[in-house]
Amino acid sequence: MEFRLLGPVEIHRTTGETIRLRRRQERLALAVMLLSPGRVVSTERLVDLLWERPPASATRSALPSLMSRIRSVLGSTGNGDEPVRLVARGGGYLLRVQPDSVDLHRFSRLLDQARAIKEPTVRSARLAAALELWRGPALADAVSGAVRDRLCGGLEELRFAAISDRIDAELDAGRHANQVAELARLTEELPLRERLHGQLMIALYRCGRRADALETYRRARRVLVAELGLEPGRQLREIHASIIADTAGPAGDTDRDMPAATAPEQLPLDLAGFVGRAAYLHQLDAQLTARSPATATTTCVITGTAGVGKTALAVHWAHRVADQFPDGQLYLNLHGFDHKSPPAPAGEAVRGLLEALGVPAARIPTTVETQAGLYRSLLSGRRVLIVLDNARDAEQVRPLLPGTPGCLVVVTSRNQLTGLVALDGAHPMTLGLLAWDEAQELLACRLGADRTTAEPDAVHQIITRTAQLPLALAIVAARAATNGGQPLAALARELGETGLDSFDGGDRMADLRAVFSWSYQALGAAEARLFRLLGLHPGPDVAIAAAASLAGTPVPQVRAMLATLARAHLIVEHTTGRYTFHDLLRAYAAELAHRHDPGSERRAALHRTLEHYLHTAYGAHQLLSPHHGPIPLAAAGSQTFPEHLVDARQAMAWYAANHRVLLNAVRLAADAGMDAIAWQLPWTLLEFFDRQGHWHDQVDIFRVALDAACRLADPAGQAHAHRGLGRAYGRLRRHADAYDHLLRAMDLYRDLGDQASQARTHANLAGILEKQGRSAEAIDHDQQALSLYRALGDLSGQARTLNNIGWYHALQGDHLAAIAHCQQALELLLQTGDRRGQANTWHSLGYAHHHLRHYRDAASSYQHALDRYREVGDRYHEADTLTHLGDTQYAANNLDAAHHTWSQARDILDALGHPDAAKVNAKLSLAHPTFAPSSPGLDLTALPLGGSGGPGARRRL
């Protein structure tokens, strides 16, 4: 199957049949994809090209329907035709087709072959063969107007270059008489093409028609002056002078419109000691390799935050591949973000490139459009590397893109330049911070490996405090290099003490504040305010709703502001809907907030943020533990926008996403003197921490909570904080500390008359006592809890306490009594829908059945428990249940299953950093699948968890 673009768009089968798609949009869509065979064409680019005013349904339905029609035509291949696949891929469409099956790409290949041929007759024949592929204007029946100019301008330039090259080859071969008529026609059709006029003058001169040759020059001059206000160019004037002097040389001496200057070599110096960035260099290499010789110029867009090393990467890579661009390398600083100069206007930028290409100032046209046209003409058929540094936006770059293949453009910008990617097919590449080993390598390169190796701790601190930002590291390295006698530890200390003041390298380009400010100053007022306030956020990242509360602005407006900040690379959307920035930008934002925003506004923003997390976490806690009594909260303000979570799964996901943020928020609330939030927020995290095994975090923030409640003299807050600490210490096996805090909580709850909290604390105390082997006292506390729950009419509390009592019967060997109590508990739990309580009770039943050697019932009960623990996201109890299930499988002589189950338990405990992982490893070492038990029913509960087979793991109150 052959595809034809050089004329009307057609599909030509091997049988000789020619097929034309019925609709113009179908022909255009096929052509756009054939221009880039084997590469994804974005949906945005297709919609932009296919519809002048895209309907709302263009992306959703119209484009897929159009593609489906094209796919059906391509799929109905005839005999001998290879199937052609059109697939949706990565936000666009990909057409899998061999480039040589497209006439345009064969044309380009023949052109490249011809340029390598020295013998003019053979070169002319090869060029003629290439030109025979043209059946009219490219994409003749598919496109018109501005879209034609975008898609076909470069192709027509290629065609003109091929025609001119073939005429040169004919003149070189001495066949000048045969070219006069064609050149006369071409100069009438294309009167502004000086190259054609020069070729006609040479042909006429060689035919002995010297006067006609001179008249041709006069006509050309009149047209150029009248149309452009320009005198003929240097080459045409030289041909004219040589004909007058009767010394005109061969046509090859007047080869092109391109000035006969030396190929430009404008790249700045490569950065000495450039390190790392291997993955990004590989991406750029891949674009160089993948570029098609027949399609538009390849454009790579390198974006990233200020100081991340975009220019260094672009220039370093350009030096690496400069030898692959024999016609030169152009470099232009567009001053998109610059303290000295405003962004370069398009006209100024194009003029700079024309001058670099050797065009005299007097010959540069006056309008941007004609300047860009001349620029593209000069680059036609050339292989030039163009680096456009520090671009402000896509509109600044677009006039500087060549229109023909052969060139490659690298653009750097702090903005994302989404339009250049979507509409012009540019390849995007976001440059991140240096990897840790790259940062170490940079310091070693600048300071010497001996010096950095001698002070590894200081190097670690420097890398941390520079946030792995290349510019910050370079400034610090320069200071260390110029103060060779100063220990790196002293410099690291200074960085911690003076913040951004340490990152002033002595001029504006090496002053981190100044470099950041050029991005900040480009923001609108609302975006600038949000950026400043983000410096007050507890971090490390922020979701859209939380940012809305921070700003006191509704979510839709804040979503747009965050997108603007992300496009400017002042923040990064590191996961969908969550934004962050590195520590130096965070410090800069906070500094700006303290400079520009009054203290009252900063405090109000902080309060809205903490209020947002408190109310969202409170709702999440109620979803996870609806049986847990509420605490009184002040109503959220009108400018706070808490998130509304709908179920326990969503609540767990929210907690997990905001885990570090919530820890920081507790500490920030305490530091800001917002003590009510400082104790209430930890209370809302209790269930999440317990399920996920974050007990060290629980200890840390409940200590903060206790201090805050004491400052408020709030006995309820103190009681909740003591109980939170008691539960965490119990999980960490600090039983004495746990017992002490729980007793303090009990005393406070009694004084407050809070019976529900007393019942829960009795159950917690029972768990600690059981772990200490004080089962009788434990049962007494559970009985007190049961009485309180019955008085309150709390079915879930009663059920959980019945499970605990059943558990103690199991520990005392009365497994039938244990089963009876647990079944009573299970009936109540099914009524209340308490999935967590059901999980605990199924585990207790499994334990009792195991010790009755009812291994099938035990395994079934443990599986029920597992399903529910996984459902509620309780990782620790999932691991504990897996351990006991493995015991049952081993006792039933199912060794492979036991080994697999214990391995799962060990992996979870390792991930939680829990010491029980060592005990599970001991079981695994004794019960390797190749190790057979000495007798059926061997019980490995001799290697218990938690000191007694895991009983304390079942207490959930």
Image: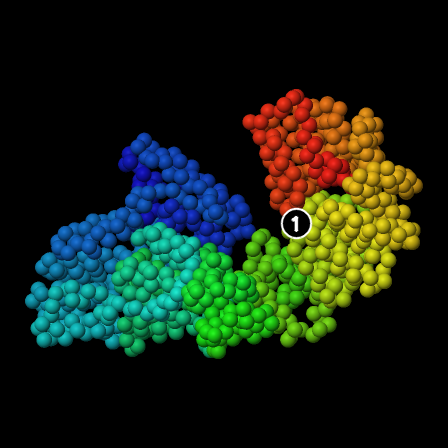
What color scheme is it? rainbow
Q: Quadrant of residue 332?
A: bottom left
User: Which residue is depicted at the point 35% across and 73% down?
Assistant: 352
In the rendered structure, the answer to whether residue 888 lies left or right of residue 132 reads: right
Q: In the image, is residue 596 above or below residue 455? A: below
Q: In the image, is residue 776 above or below residue 525? A: above
Q: In the image, is residue 849 above or below residue 356? A: above
The percent position of residue 230, horizontal first and vertical second, equals: 28, 75
Please say whether residue 366 is visible from this viewpoint: yes
Q: Nearer the viewer, residue 469 or 156?
A: 469
Q: Residues within 10 Å of mark 1 (few under 14, many from 20)?
A: some
Q: Nearer the viewer, residue 934 or 272?
A: 934
In the rendered structure, the answer to whether residue 176 lies left or right of residue 686 reads: left
User: Which residue is depicted at the point 31% across and 65% down?
Assistant: 329
The percent position of residue 734, horizontal first and vertical second, equals: 75, 48
The percent position of residue 80, horizontal first and vertical second, equals: 30, 32
User: Which residue is depicted at the point 90% across and 53% down?
Assistant: 752
Q: Nearer the viewer, residue 476 or 791?
A: 476
Q: Quadrant of residue 119?
A: bottom left
In the rendered structure, the answer to whether residue 727 lies left or right of residue 456 reads: right
- Looking at the image, which residue sits at the far left? 208
Query: Which residue is tagged 1?
Result: 656
The percent position of residue 578, horizontal first and vertical second, equals: 60, 55
Amino acid tagged 1: Ala
Q: Nearer the viewer, residue 848 or 565?
A: 848
Give SS at disc 1: helix
Please say whether residue 311 is visible from this viewpoint: no
Q: Quadrant of the N terminus?
A: top left
User: Which residue is depicted at the point 45% across and 56% down?
Assistant: 428
- Looking at the image, which residue sits at the far front? 934
Q: Quadrant of the C terminus?
A: top right
